[in-house]
Image (tube, grey):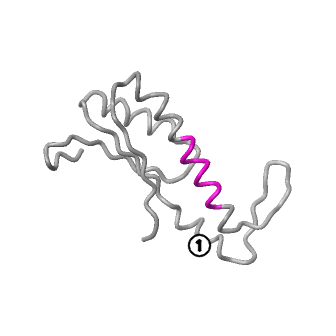
């Protein structure tokens, strides 16, 4: 919780995985109980970004089809996760009565 400048804020970092509902749910409940703003940070996964630069890295889907893992593919995946987080927050913030912000910091 960050109370700088009299602002209560709960910050939760998310690593870009699909299992985001439980951490977001807990953070929403925590922020609601404190009457604080929720700030979600969706971090770039450095391991995926580094792997996407290798020419031999491939992704194999559920059907067994393999495709090159490119930087564009990783960015598309991160955008999908960000949309899922945003949809979850939109659905939950009204009933919880909290303000929220989703940030996607890039770089180091």
Q: Does the magenta stretch include residue 77?
A: yes
Q: Is label 1 in a helix, a strand or a loop?
A: helix
Residue at the left extreme of this rendering? 6
Describe residue 63's horizontal placement relative to residue 45 as left or right.
right
Image-quadrant location for residue 55 = bottom right
Q: Which residue lies furthest to the top in this view?
A: 95
Q: How many marks?
A: 1
**Residue occupying the point 78% across, 58% down:** 60
Closer-to-camera residue (67/7): 7
Indicate whether residue 87 is drawn in magenta: no
> Could you say where residue 21 lies in the image, as x and y percent from the top left?
51, 36
Question: Label 1 crowding class (10 Å Cα cut-off): few <14, some 14-19, many 20+?
Answer: few
Residue at x 49% of width, y 53% of height: 15
Q: The N terminus lies in which quarter of the figure?
A: top left
88 or 64: nearer the viewer = 88
For the record, the magenta segment spans 74-84
- Residue 33 image-quadrant placement: top left
Which residue is found at the position 58% from the left and 54% from the top? 78
Residue 90: % across, % down: 47, 32
The residue at which mark 1 appears reads as 50
Q: In which quarter of the image is residue 52?
A: bottom right
In the figure, is residue 40 to the left or right of 53?
Answer: left
Q: Which residue is drawn at 57% across and 41% down?
A: 84
Asked if residue 17 is positioned above or below residue 68 in the image, the reply reads above
Locate residue 47, reporting x and y percent. 56, 67
Above or below for 87 versus 57: above
> What secondary structure do most residues of the magenta stretch adopt?
helix
In the image, residue 37 lies at what x, y percent? 29, 38
Left or right: 66 as drawn, with respect to 11 = right
Residue furthest bottom as drawn: 55
Q: Quadrant of the C terminus?
A: bottom left
């Amino acid at each position: 919780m960050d109370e700088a400048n009299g602002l209560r804020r709960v910050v939760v970092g998310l690593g870009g995985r699909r299992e985001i509902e439980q951490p977001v749910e807990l953070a929403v409940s925590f922020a609601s109980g404190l009457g604080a703003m929720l700030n979600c940070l969706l971090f770039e996964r450095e391991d995926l970004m580094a792997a996407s630069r290798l020419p031999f890295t491939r992704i194999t889907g559920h059907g067994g089809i393999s495709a090159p893992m490119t930087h564009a593919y990783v960015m598309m995946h991160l955008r999908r996760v960000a949309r899922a987080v945003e949809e979850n927050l939109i659905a939950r913030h009204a009933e919880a009565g909290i303000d929220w912000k989703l940030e996607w910091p890039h770089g180091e």
